[in-house]
Amino acid sequence: MDQQRAASDGYYEVFWPRSPRQFKTGKLAPRLDTLAGKTVAQFWDFVFSGDKVFAALEESLKARYPGVRFISWREFGNTHGQNEREILAGLPQRLKELGVDAAISGMGC
């Protein structure tokens, strides 16, 4: 051990544990100016207490943004469960059908 320490002279090689990026990020969707009069979808992975959190968010956002409308997480199902692939694959079309302007995805811990 002492020979190793002496040979290193305080210098150690290290490696960055992350791999290079595999894809480039795209442009982000433009932000909404307001949620007033908008339709907001809720997605939940059925972990933690999303039912309680979404109820509190709805109450708070309705008080702040007149006419905001919510489409409950119940409409979409578990976004991190047995049918996750099917649910996520169908989301773009479903959101279009429902006229969704924004989404909140939660929870996890």
Image (spheres, helix red, strand yellow):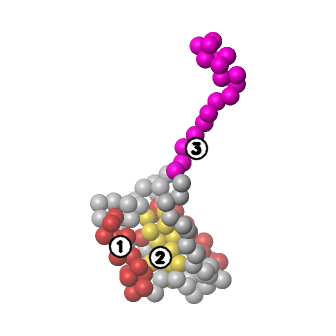
What residue appears at the point 35 percent right and 73 percent down from the top-left corner? 89
Query: Residue 99 has which mark?
Result: none
Label 3 crowding class (10 Å Cα cut-off): few <14, some 14-19, many 20+? few
Q: What amino acid is labelled 3 in the image? A: Trp
Quadrant of the image occupied by residue 83: bottom left
User: How far apart, in angstroms, are the residues tagged by discs 2 and 3?
Assistant: 38 Å
Name the residue located 65 percent from the left edge and 23 percent from the top edge.
8
For label 2, the residue is 41
- Amino acid identity at mark 2: Ala
Mark 2 / mark 3, whichever is N-terminal: 3
Q: What SS does tag 3 mark?
A: loop
Residue 30 appears in view:
yes
Q: How many marks?
A: 3
Query: Does the magenta run of residues contain 11?
Result: yes
Closest to the camera, between mark 2 and mark 3, is 3
Q: Are marks 1 and 2 in contact (CB under 8 Å)?
A: no
Which numbered tag is attached to residue 89? 1
x, y percentage for residue 42?
Answer: 47, 72
Please tell me the numbered disc located at residue 16: 3
| Cα–Cα gap, marks 1 and 2 | 16 Å
Which residues, given as a range, are shown in magenta?
A: 1-19
